[in-house]
Amino acid sequence: MEWGLGYEKQMRSQPLEKNFPSLSYIVSNWPKTKPLLRKFALSKQLKPNLFKICYLCLRELKVFKDKKIILFLKKAAAMCLVNKTYNSYHDSHHFKTVVVIACMIAMSERLSERDRALLIIVALCHDFDHQGRRIISRPYYQEEISFQKFRRLFHKSIFRTSEINRIHKIFRNTYFPLKPTKTNDKLEKIVLDADILASLMFDISTGLNFAKRIKHELKMSTTSEELYKSFLKSIDKQTLYMATSKNLC
């Protein structure tokens, strides 16, 4: 793969992680940079620096001066690195990927500065304290657990009541089997698309890799191939919300 003359400079300018370029470079050179994002999503060698990734995404979305948001993200990112149930899919690497993809979608959309900040927060925390192997297959069970833990820890920090209610709705709607057919909330549309794209936007081998991780996390007896086919079948009639999301595939 050949890169332009500005590649090394942009590699040094706010890289997402070591040996990865900046998000602006990935977006401006898409789809040539898709293998780089795939490598970033698949990486599990080291815990990601979630705070740094979120901070860089805020800068990409031109959110610069909100100190309360920065302090919140520092605390939330540290807690999102904790993996008490040893999840192999719903872990810090899933969180980092959803944050980055959500930011990529948002970079071409009109959002208020507050919504740009909320987008990064919700993308980071949507699977907060995920139960992994202890999950119960009742609709919204995990999503409610994630939200209640999120609200208990953070509701007094920076959020208005209307924002907490909005975040609650988005958390619930990340329960994929009951994905809403319509929503007027662009922030919600971006988060729901990013959550799916995190395991869908690459190639079949990547999809099988993620299916293997979910299979291990849930201790399922089915094969990774069967699980992946089942996932593809379940999304057959459920399209992505944003045109930008479709262009990333």
Image: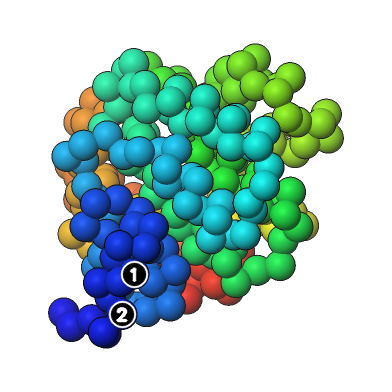
CB under 8 Å between discs 2 and 1: yes
Quadrant of the frame with the N terminus: bottom left
**Residue at left offset 41%, top offset 63%:** 23
Q: Can I make out residue 209 in this image?
A: yes
Amino acid type indicated by mark 2: Gly
Where residue 72 appears, x then y in whole percent? 60, 30
Q: What element carries label 1?
A: helix
**Is 5 or 147 nearer to us in this picture?**
5
Q: Is residue 65 left or right of residue 160?
A: left
**Residue at left offset 55%, top offset 34%:** 73
Q: Is residue 7 left or right of residue 183?
A: left
Tally the marks.
2
Q: Measured along the vertical axis of the image, is residue 160 above or below residue 205?
A: above
**Residue at left offset 38%, top offset 72%:** 25
Where residue 195 appears, x then y in whole percent? 47, 49
Asked where in the image residue 32 lies, by quadrant, the reply is bottom left
Quadrant of the frame with the C terminus: bottom left
Which residue position is annotated with label 2? Answer: 6
Amino acid type indicated by mark 1: Gln
Where residue 182 appears, x then y in whole percent? 71, 57
Which residue position is annotated with label 1? Answer: 10
- Disc 1 crowd rating (10 Å Cα; few below 14, some 14-19, many 20+) is some
Q: Distance between the residues labelled 2 and 1?
A: 6 Å
